[in-house]
Structures are given as C-alpha cells and as structure tokens.
Image (cartoon, rainbow, N blue to C red):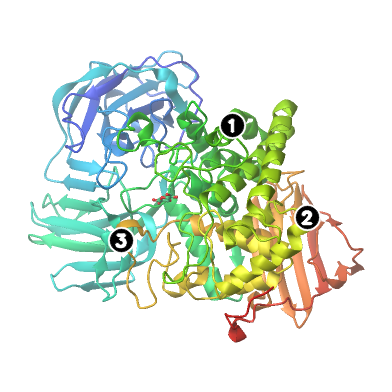
Amino acid sequence: MEKAAPDSVATGWVAEMIRPLSDQGVGTPASFVSKTFRLDRVGGREVLRISALGLYRCFINGRRVGHDLLTPGWTAYDKRLSFQTYLVADLLVPGENEISIWLGDGWLRSQLMWGKAPIFNTWGEHIAAIAELRAAPEDRDPILVTDASWQSGELPIRKSGIYYGEAFDARLTPVVSAGVEPLPFDSSILVAHETTPVRELVPIEVVRSWTDAEGRTVYDFGQNLGGYVAFSVKGDAGARVEVEHGEVLDQSGQFYNGNYRTAAARFEYTLAGKGEEHYRPTFTFQGYRYARVTISGNARLTHIVSVPISSVTEVKASFTSANPLVNRLVLNTLWSQRSNFIEVPTDCPQRDERLGWTGDAQVFAGTACYLADTQSFFTKWLRDVVADQREDGAVPHVVPDPTRLKPQDYPGFFGSTGWGDAIAQVPWQVYLHYGDTAILRETLPAMVKWVDFVWSISDGPIVSPPRQWGGRGFTFGDWLQPSGPSAKPLPTIGDDAAATIYLFITASLVGRIARIVGETGIAARMEDMASQVKSAFAREFVTASGRLAYDDQTSYALAILHDLVPEEHREAAKDYFKSTILRSEGRIGTGFIGTPALLPSLVKIGEPGIAADVFLQEQVPGWLYQVKMGATTIWERWDAIAPDGSIYNPQMNSYNHYAYGAVCQWLFEGVAGFRPDPQDPGFATIIFEPTIIPELSPVAASHDSIAGTIKAGWSVEGETVTYDVEVPDQSRGLLRLPAGARNAQVDGQAWNGGDEPLSAGQHRIVFELAPAARLGLDKLDINARTP
Ligand code: BGC
C-alpha cells in the first residue's frame, strides 16, 4: 500500500473532528473510533486522508494503513496540524468494511517539560480523529467521513505517553462501548505532512546480556538511539514483561537511568497467554542503549531487538580517516541526529525534555544537512518556529513550544540570543545546501522581527540580557562552557558579549538574505544595525591592547570568525586567542555556541596545527574523550562520565545530544574541505579548501548533495599532499589551497595560485606543505605566557 501524493486530494475538508466518548482523559487507556461501511465495488484508487488530535494509527478491515510512525506528527497544533494521505484500495473489499482509528495521548496531551512543572494537555484535553475516504483522489465528495455516527471504545493500550512509555494488556480486545462527539475544529489549520514520515530503521540485535542480582535481565544493544525494543514472548495469561531503558552503566557496571528524571520511560506488557506473542509500542519511543527486563509470572522472552526510529532514513555523507576515534565520532553524530530527528529536531530522546531546542538546532543545522537530506524536515520545523514566535519577535527556546499556551510555570521561555537565531541560521543552511530561496523569502519577516527584538532588549547595539531566567532577553550565553578546575576557574564569556556578538552575526546574515531575495530596504536597515553593533562591540569589548574583555576561547572564536575584531587589533587578538588555548592545555573551553566556531577560527588565524591539537587531544573536555569512554552517541556535556567512570550529576546529563556533533561540519568543510558557495548555492559551485592534519591521513569524505555526489580526500607522504576531488556533473569546483602550499599541480598542470576553477569530474591535486606549527602539548609549560 503506497502513500498517495500529499496534496492529491485538493478539496476542503467536510469530515468532522470526532472524539471518542470512551476516553477518560490524559494518562488513561487509549481509545479508538470506528465505523463499518459498505462498498458496492473497490475501484482501485480509493484514497484516505487522515489526521488526529493526539497520535493515531489506522486499520481497515484489521490491516494497518501505511508504516508511518507517530502520525500525524508534531507541530504547533493550535496553528498547524499535519495530515497524511494513503491509497487504501488493497485494504478494502466489496461489501462490508470496517475502519478503526486508534488514538493515543502523544505530544498533544501527555507530559511535556520537566521536574516540578510538567505540562499536560498542552494543546488540548481531547484526543480525536478526522478522516475522509474517497473513491478517487480527484473526487470532490468523499464516500466516508468521520462524523457523529461513528463509535468508540477502549484499547489494550492502558496508558501511553511520550515520556511515560506504554502499558499494553494483550488480554483485552478493542470493544465498542460508546459513541463519539464532534469537536469544534477549524480544518483550515490542516496541512499536508511536510517531510519524510518517521519510520523504523534496521533493527539491532542484542550484543550482550546478563542477569542482575534481582533476577532481571539487562540487554546491551551496543548502540544508544531513539526508538523502542520489540520482543516476542511466550507464557501464561496475566504474566507481565516490564522494560526499563538506560543509556550507560554506572561506575560498578550496573544498569543506570537516573538521568531520565521524571520520564518513566518504560513498557509494561501483560500476556494474553496465546502462544508466541509479539509487542512493540504504538504511541511512544525511548532513548536508550540498554533495556532491563523484569518478568513476573510464568513467561519467557523468545526474542528481543532494538528498533531505531527516525525521520532520517537515508545517510547522505561519510567521513573516514586514519583515526578510529574520529571515525566513531562521526558515526556517533549520525546516531544522535537519527535519534533526535524524530518529527522535530530535539535536544535529547530519553529524559523528560525531548524538545525542539532552537539553539541546538541552529548550531547543528550545517552538519545535519551533510549527514541527511533535511530540506523538508527543517522547512516544516521553521514554519512552527514562525508559528510560535511571539508578537514582539521573540523566538521561543523550544519549538513546538508548550509554554506558549501554558506559560504559567515557564514565563518568558523565549528570546535567548544563540537560540532564537535559529530563525536565520537554519534557513541559511537550507539555502546553502539546497539552493532554496523560497525558505528565505518565507522566513525573512520572522528573521527581521527577531533582530528587532534583540535590538530592543537593551534598546541599542550592545545587548545586556537580564540574569534572571524568564527575564525579557534572558540568554543561555555559551551554555555549558567549561571553566576548568573550580578552584581556579578559566574565564568564560559574559552574556552581554555573547548576545551582542549574536546580534551582529544575525543582523549581518539577515541583511545578506534580504539582498538575495531582493528586499533591499530591509537589507540596508539590517546592514546598518550590524555596522552599529560592530563599532559598539569594538568600543565595549576590545581593549586597547587587542585583548577581548572576557578573554575566553568563545569570545575570540566567534569574534574572529565573524570579523568583529578591528583590523588594528587582529594580530594581538590572535596571540591572546592562542594563550586561551595554552591556558587550558590545548583543551576545549567552549560551550554550545562557541564550540562550532573554535576550530574554523583557529584555521582562519593560520593555526591549523593548533586546531588539530585541540581536536585530537583525548582528555576531558574534548570530542575524542567521550568516544574513548565508549560513547555511541554525542554527549550533552563534555564531562558526562569522569575518567574514573563516575557519572556526572543526573539533573542534566544526557548521553544523546547532537549539539557538540556540530564539529562534523568542520570535518566536511574544513578538513576534507568542500562547502557550498553562497554566491552559487546548492553545490552548483563547490569550494574545495582542505585543512591538512597529517595524523588523519588518509582522509576520505563524500556527500550526496542535491547537485550529485561530491568526493574529497587527501593523503600525506612526508610533505607531499595528494588531494583527490570529484565534482558532480552539473556543478563546478573552485580550488583554494591551504596557506603555504607550494609546487602545486592540478591534474598535472602547474597551479597558478589563487582560486582554481575545476570542471565536473575527478581531479588530482598534488602540492607540498610544511607541517603546521603545533601547540607542543607534550613539552607545554603551562606557566609560560605569550605575549
Ligand atoms: C537542553 C539543551 C538546551 C539547553 C538550554 C537544556 O536543558 O537540553 O538542549 O540547549 O537546555 O538551556
């Protein structure tokens, strides 16, 4: 049964949104609505379009419609609700038919947000369904619609929730016990689902299992992910299988999930006692690597697998090098993207959060566009960002935003620089990767409202955010920026500098975007704001010696990458920047917003060797430390597990946050060295500019871009570098060799210096390059100060 084209049914909706009267509210048994109907004949082009408040799964004559998961999906339900369209002829029969739509709490009303202030019924108290069946897509009138004549009843799903998990009693069968009630519903908010559906990926078998002291069995699937376990079981009616989920083992190797906070994250299956039974959840998913199974009563599992689910079903890039830790880091980033691209780009898939955090999405967007085709995924999400944006332009911290309709416990949960900037940064990446000007045009008004909001925080070019959470313009700053030993903390960036830098970054970008879409008036205004911020930044945060006020890695990385340091201070600022790296013994000193800028800015100041040292060092904080400690996804915190195996404070410690995986953008664009040209986006023109790190040789990367497959890789023999690139048929390349490259040959021809155009096809570039200056960490005397 295939999916029908989303907008194949063009006419307006006549069906009603009907709620099951069997439903007792959030956290109670799930319900179904159903209808039996007669068909004289099945024409073969019957099409069903369907949506729901809450999550739905539809069955016709007992057979499931489609394979999509967590439908209709997650959007800002009060303003936008997705629907799906399916060709269902193969499920229908001439004569009596029965349609049943199962409904679960889902994101609509199960718990969202955390701790002492969980939110329930965020977008409504009632689960409900709306559906129309037509004999053919072009038919104006449906042959069946949801209306007051349908019936309802309870399901064997006794409780379900995104965080909670699911309880299923297989002894029960769905029985009609009540009618339905049409709800007041504005069908104009229904939109055809805008991206790839959530689907199951290849299941993963158990790699190790053991029984703990309490007789429970712990299964290790070897891969942390977002998804669910699926098992088969045999036993007596009434026997129960309980499944708990964990991402890591504690210091003594025991099952651990203290970091899930108030997310119960469990499944309970009660056996019907009818031979081999099979279970996987319907209305939830969990984030985990380990599953702990408790069986009560006489039953035994005959099989259990881990089923990853994601909106990302195809991998569009690869990066390999001589360093297995680096290669695993890329794989961990991919798994964190898969785990957190489930309808919405979320922060994490396991604890009582799993929210569309804007800051995380903006720093990760570039990487996300390499590893997968995210054009429609981000387009859908950006429309919800616009829907949730506040009147005064403030962009919320999370989208879809539960606090817009339920602000009481989370007042002012919007307006953070570095987070709200997703409204400009994410469309920009979609434009660069897919040449998509439509998304720029569509989101530009929201971008401008955001820049005006940030300017209004302190009514001027220097942004001074309030300290208190929920204050207007509160910022997360450089969230989770490491500050070294508590006894002698390292400098970190101040909120005012972080906010002011981001105002400059985004005002400049929105000006550029406005020019691209021909909005010259807006462009001029944004560019003027940006230049005011630039000169104010120099006055406020650049000292006479060229040191930046907060003198931390994030300040230098962002200011240097975005050309905020005045010309006359650039050389001095470079030295101060280097000393922040020396001060931390070559370790990372950046958080969520500083980290993506750290390595590119070091290469920009002509220190690829220092960038290599920082990237390749294996101590905490560092990218490779977590891989060495056994991570199979990206950690939220650099120090999530200490070298002695002890686990960091569970209050905020996810082992599956993609934010720090944003370094992969640098592996593709910086190290392998290919990126889209903003002048000619969508990889119509590809800029090739590698950064040579001899320890990683050979490096090989590829990306299935919208323009075709791009390849780039290099190997180093002594001081000779061989750089092989492949330019897709419809594209052209622009070669930029690293500073210091000499005796270069392109396809055997002498390189003429400057940007070298490359035609479609394969090219071999050979050049010599002296090893870059390194930090010399091994002989580093931390007390030495330069200058
Ligand atoms: C989330 C992050 C988010 C941060 C900002 C955390 O709780 O998990 O993803 O960026 O809060 O405060």
Task: Look at mark 1 in the image and give the residue it sits on.
Answer: 452
Residue 712 pos. (x, y %):
71, 63
User: Marks 2 and 3: in contact by CB < 8 Å?
Assistant: no
Mark closest to the chain's N terminus, 3 or 1: 1
Kind of residue at badge 1: Asp
Percent x, y of residue 68: 39, 41
CB of mark 3 near ligand 1 (< 8 Å): no
Q: CA distance from mark 1 to mark 2?
A: 28 Å
Would you say residue 321 is visible in this rendering? no
First reached walking from the N terminus: tag 1 or tag 2: 1
Task: Say if 492 sits above or below 181 in the image.
Answer: below
Please count the marks in the image: 3
Q: In the current view of this chain or complex, which residue is farthest to the bottom?
A: 779
Front label number (3 vs 2): 2
Residue at 24% from the left image edge and 72% from the top image edge: 254
Alpha-carbon distance for marks 3 and 1? 38 Å
Query: Based on the displayed image, in which of its 4 quarters is residue 548 positioned?
Result: bottom right
| Crowd around label 3: few <14 · some 14–19 · many ≥20 (10 Å) | few
Amino acid type of the residue tagged 3 in the rendering = Pro
Viewer-side residue, 88 vs 110:
110
Q: Which mark is residue 567?
A: 2
Query: Which amino acid does the dot numbered 2 rest on?
Result: Glu
